[in-house]
């Protein structure tokens, strides 16, 4: 049975919903995620792009992703909360930030992406040993 997920930004100006996709939930430690979130990593839940709906008042920031293709980040223009990440490389999926879900308890990540880029103080790396301190 398809699981519909709902979420919103902090201030409630932007809401979204979509069906959870059969793809990996992951934690990403890359520098892009560190800079975009202002934290050590991003926690992402995949939804099916076909089912995904979001208020068109949200803003989109376009950048070049690790794949060399455009990647899009949607955020609230009022409170600045980041809501989604989508890549040209995987157009059928929209990743939402786990913390933006109305019920974030469904987040059960099984993989860390770019664990080598994790900051030494970001110790909750999934499935790997804690990151080593840079020399
Ligand atoms: Zn907002
Ligand atoms: Zn990342």
Image: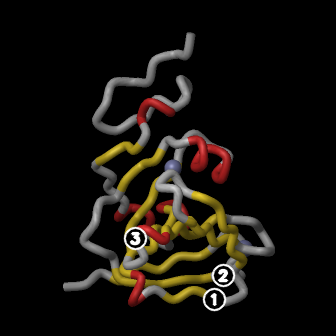
Residue 24 shows which numbered tag?
A: none
The residue singled out by tag 3 in the image is 90
Up/down of 113 relative to 7, above or below? above
Q: Along the polypeptide, which appears first: circle 2 or circle 3?
A: 2
Q: How far apart are marks 3 and 1 (CA)?
A: 21 Å
Q: Judge left or right: residue 32 versus residue 66.
A: right
Q: How far apart are marks 2 and 3 (CA)?
A: 23 Å
The residue singled out by tag 2 in the image is 14
Residue 103 coordinates in the image, percent (x, y): 44, 69
Q: Along the polypeptide, which appears first: circle 3 or circle 1?
A: 1
Up/down of 36 relative to 105, above or below? above
Residue 69 coordinates in the image, percent (x, y): 52, 63
Quadrant placement of the C terminus: top right
The crowd level at tag 3 (other Cα within 10 Å; few <14, some 14-19, many 20+) is few
Indicate yes or no: mark 2 CB to ligand 1 under 8 Å. Answer: yes
| Residue for point 37% across, 60% down | 107
Residue 76 coordinates in the image, percent (x, y): 71, 73
Quadrant placement of the N terminus: bottom left
- Relative to the observer, which residue lies in front, 124 or 42? 42
Q: Which colour scheme is used?
A: secondary structure
Q: Are marks 2 and 1 in contact (CB under 8 Å)?
A: yes
The residue singled out by tag 1 in the image is 55
| Residue for point 31% across, 30% down | 128
Q: What element carries label 3?
A: helix
């Amino acid at each position: 049975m398809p699981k519909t997920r709902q979420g919103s930004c902090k201030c409630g100006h932007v809401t979204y919903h979509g069906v959870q996709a059969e793809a990996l939930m992951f934690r990403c430690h890359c520098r892009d995620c560190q800079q975009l979130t202002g934290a050590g990593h991003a926690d992402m839940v995949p939804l099916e792009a076909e089912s995904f709906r979001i208020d068109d008042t949200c803003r989109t920031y376009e950048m070049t992703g690790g794949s060399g293709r455009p990647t899009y980040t949607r955020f609230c223009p009022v409170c600045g909360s980041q809501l989604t990440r989508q890549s040209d490389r995987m157009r059928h999926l929209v990743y939402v930030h786990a913390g933006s879900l109305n019920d974030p308890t469904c987040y059960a990540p099984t993989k860390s992406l770019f664990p080598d880029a994790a900051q030494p103080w970001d110790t909750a790396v999934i499935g790997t040993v804690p990151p080593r301190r840079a020399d």
